[in-house]
Amino acid sequence: MQIHKSLTIAGIGLAFLALAGCGSTSSQDSAGAIDMAVMEPESVSSESVQFDQRESEQFVTRNSSISLQGSNVANMAQSVLAVTEAFAGTISQQDIRNENEQSYASLTVRVPNNELDAYLSALSEIGKVTYLSTSSLDVTTTVIDLDARIETLNTSITRLAQLQTEAANVADLVAVESELTARTAERDSLVAQREFLQDQVDLSTVYVDIAADPATSTDSPNFLQGIQDGWNALINALAATITFAGFLIPILGSIFLLAIVIVAIVLVIKRVRQQK
């Protein structure tokens, strides 16, 4: 009975030890799961950079190109600048040039998207419209995807920052900092893309080309310019005359010498005949 009682006590002790070991293993597994959950991003709110967005909102970019013709390119370009300022737009590029006695101008304009149609209508009153094109692109899906990814990364960055303060050793700290740096860089890149896309949605780009209309463009009278052109023409005529005279001198000189030789030969022949 004593041996049987000892075996029973030993069995109970081994059972308690087995249960304790299983509890320890389960605790370790649970701790590992918590660490992984901290490392994995979740879609919850964050204090980092985010973009407000309504599910029903639509994001569309619009760009236009317009060509104008008129009698005075410089004045038309100034009118475009004035209209752009009236619509709270900006000029990102401006070029006015003269080629083959013809004037041309090109401007790149940014105007609020909701004012694009009214802006194009105002430009059509500056000159004759020879070309007009408007293109639209729906980027709603791209915006929603960027917002979701940014929000997810913001959550992950917040969790990693908290885990960084709780790191127990240098190896864990280095690993957390490396992951935090990588996810912060990815988040900043997505934020830059989102801001650029929002700028394209808020402001439309308009390419404006201006050219002189051959049917209406005229040269304004300029008396002094006429005198200068006449004087230049006279100088050119005198220069051409002098050049032509210089060209004739060698030829006339050669003809004169040849005539003298021929006359001398004829005189010699006559004298020889008279002596006979």
Image (spheres, rainbow, N blue to C red):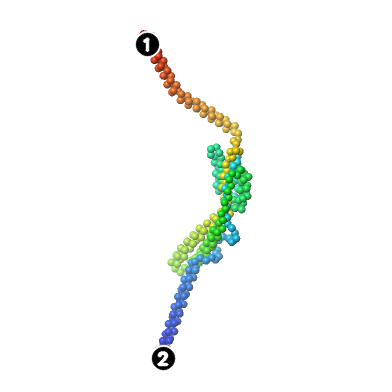
150 lies above or below 29? above
Q: Secondary structure at mark 1?
A: helix
Q: Which residue is mark 2?
A: 1
Name the residue at 44% across, 80% down. 18
Quadrant housing residue 12: bottom left
- Give the Cα separation between the discs numbered 1 and 2: 183 Å
Q: Is residue 105 above or below residue 268?
A: below
Q: Amino acid at mark 2?
A: Met
In the rendered image, the quadrant that contains the N terminus is bottom left
Corner quadrant of residue 53? bottom right
- Single out the residue that lies furthest toward the left: 276
Q: Which residue is mark 1?
A: 272
Between residue 75 and residue 64, name the one nearer to us. 64
Image spot of residue 194 (x, y percent): 54, 57
| Left or right: where 8 falls relative to 129 | left
Residue occupying image coordinates x 61% and y 46%: 123
Amino acid carrying mark 1 in the image: Val
Q: Classify 10 Å Cα crowding around label 1: few (below 14), some (14-19), many (20 and above).
A: few
